Amino acid sequence: MEKSKIEWTDYSLNVIKGYCPNTCSYCYSHRMYNRFKWDKTIRYDVNELKKLKTIREPSRIFVGSMIDMYHEDVHG
C-alpha cells in the first residue's frame, strides 16, 4: 500500500499484483510494469493486506489501481 498522489484518494492498495491481461489504451499500468521491469506474474500479495493495519484514521483507499481485479485470468 502506498500513499497516493491522486487527489481523490489517500492510499492505493494492490492485493492482486501482476501484468493486467487487458490492453486498455487509457491505462497506465502496462507502461509502469514495462518501465520498472516489475514481475508480471499475476499473484495475490497477502502482505499488502496486512498494511491496512498501519492506517490509524479514516482514509480513502483505491483498491486495485494496477489491474482489472475481475478479469478471468486473475481468478482462474
Image (spheres, helix red, strand yellow):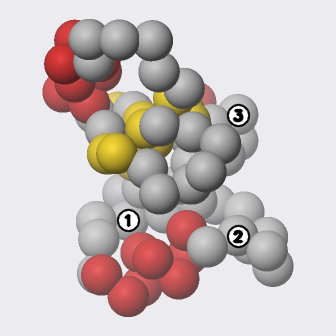
Looking at this view, name the residue that lies furthest to the right.
Answer: 25
Whether residue 66 sits left or right of residue 41 in the image: it is right
The disc, 2 or 1, on the residue closer to the chain's N-terminal end is 2
Residue neighbourhood size for the residue with mark 2, other residues' Cα within 10 Å, grouped as few (<14), some (14–19), many (≥20): some
Whether residue 62 sits left or right of residue 43 in the image: it is right
| Depth order, front residue of 21/26 | 26
Looking at this view, name the residue that lies furthest to the bottom.
Answer: 35
Amino acid type for the residue under numbered disc 1: Lys
The disc, 3 or 2, on the residue closer to the chain's N-terminal end is 2
The answer to whether any part of residue 73 appears in the image is no
Q: Please tell me whether mark 1 sits on a helix, a strand or a loop.
A: loop
Tell me the quadrant of the picture where the C terminus can be found. top right
**Where is residue 32 shown, x and y percent of the image?**
45, 77
Based on the displayed image, in which of its 4 quarters is residue 54 positioned?
top left
- Badge number at residue 26: none
**Residue marked by disc 1:** 40
At horizontal 57% and vertical 39% (from top left) the residue drawn is: 9
The answer to whether any part of residue 19 appears in the image is yes
**Where is residue 3 shown, x and y percent of the image?**
34, 45
**Residue marked by disc 2:** 27
Q: Please tell me whether mark 2 sits on a helix, a strand or a loop.
A: loop
Amino acid type for the residue under numbered disc 2: Cys
The relative height of residue 17 versus residue 37 in the rendered view (above or below) is above
**Where is residue 23 shown, x and y percent of the image?**
74, 72
Whether residue 7 sits left or right of residue 31 in the image: it is right
At horizontal 28% and vertical 65% (from top left) the residue drawn is: 39
**Residue marked by disc 3:** 70
Amino acid type for the residue under numbered disc 3: Tyr
**Where is residue 72 shown, x and y percent of the image?**
69, 39
| Depth order, front residue of 58/63 | 58
- Disc 3 and disc 1: Cα gap in Å? 17 Å
Based on the displayed image, in which of its 4 quarters is residue 57 positioned?
top left
